[in-house]
Amino acid sequence: MKIALVDSGVGLLAAAAAVRAARPDADLVLSNDPDGMPWGPRGSQDIAERALTCARAAAQHQPQALIIACNTASVHGLPTVRAQLEPGIPVIGTVPAVKPAAAGGGTVAIWATPATTGSPYQRRLIEEFGNGAKITEVPCHGLADAVERGDEEAIDQAIAAAAALTPAGVRAVVLGCTHYELVRARIEHAVRTPGHPPVALHGSARAVTAQALRRIAPEAAERRGQGELTVLHGGRPGRLPELVGRYAEGRALLSPDSLIS
């Protein structure tokens, strides 16, 4: 079994680690765009083209499924990538987990990039899946970039700023950017309110992994051992950047030949 994942940078680590946990034998192809990141500030067509370039490079390795492990790329590029690769390769997009977060009602916050916060796309998700919950959209200025750089101080500052915009006593927080899942423990601590139950954090990594595995032919039986890891930078063979070792999801993927020294 081989599964490819596409993102501009390290945001794909959360879904890649979830795939590794569910199917240790699966070969992984991580295709990103270090020369073009971040994708968020770019125009819709540019994002779609860059996502398609990364997806085409990954498709050359003949995966059984491809995950667009980026909320922004899923919004702007999913139809383009699907039109090019399906039905030969199932393509799974990443959607913020608004539905499960809002299922219990109460107060919910959606942490997302400033470009996504308040966007028609996110508002449609809230209207369709909000379930009557009181939902607050929280722009997380600089958080994705700080995670991408592995800048500890900037990560803490961005989380603190977003937490200050989050209602006290919030019941659930949707992690509306795949980068945020890499620092979920810090986010959970920042939004915790004394005297209230722990806040439930809802990411997308497990859901997209489950969907990818459902789309793969059932004859893809599990094999012994750990799968291989292929890294592509702009379609070129590469290695994982050293900073991925700062995140638990990154450490789950490391091997002696996959890390830049």
Image (cartoon, rainbow, N blue to C red):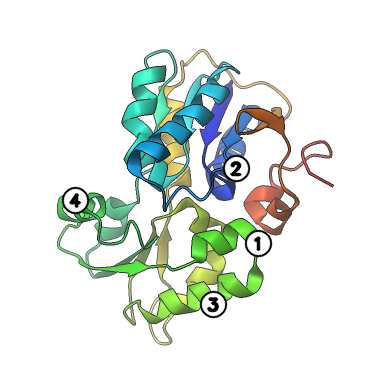
Closer to the chain start, of discs 2 and 3, is 2
Report the mark closest to the observer, 2 or 4.
2
Closer to the chain start, of discs 3 and 4, is 4
Depth order, front residue of 140/1:
140
Which residue is under mark 3? Answer: 157
The quarter of the displayed image where residue 32 is located: top right
Q: Residue at x 48, y 24 (%)?
A: 65
Residue type at mark 4? Arg
Which residue is under mark 2? Answer: 35
Residue type at mark 3? Gln
> Distance from label 1 to label 4 (Cα)?
32 Å
> Distance from label 3 to label 1 (Cα)?
13 Å
Which residue is under mark 4? Answer: 124
Question: Where residue 150 is drawn, which disc sits there?
Answer: 1
Question: Mark 2–mark 3 contact, CB under 8 Å?
Answer: no
Depth order, front residue of 190/31:
31
Q: Residue at x 73, y 38 (%)?
A: 239
Q: In this view, does 43 lie above or below 81?
A: below
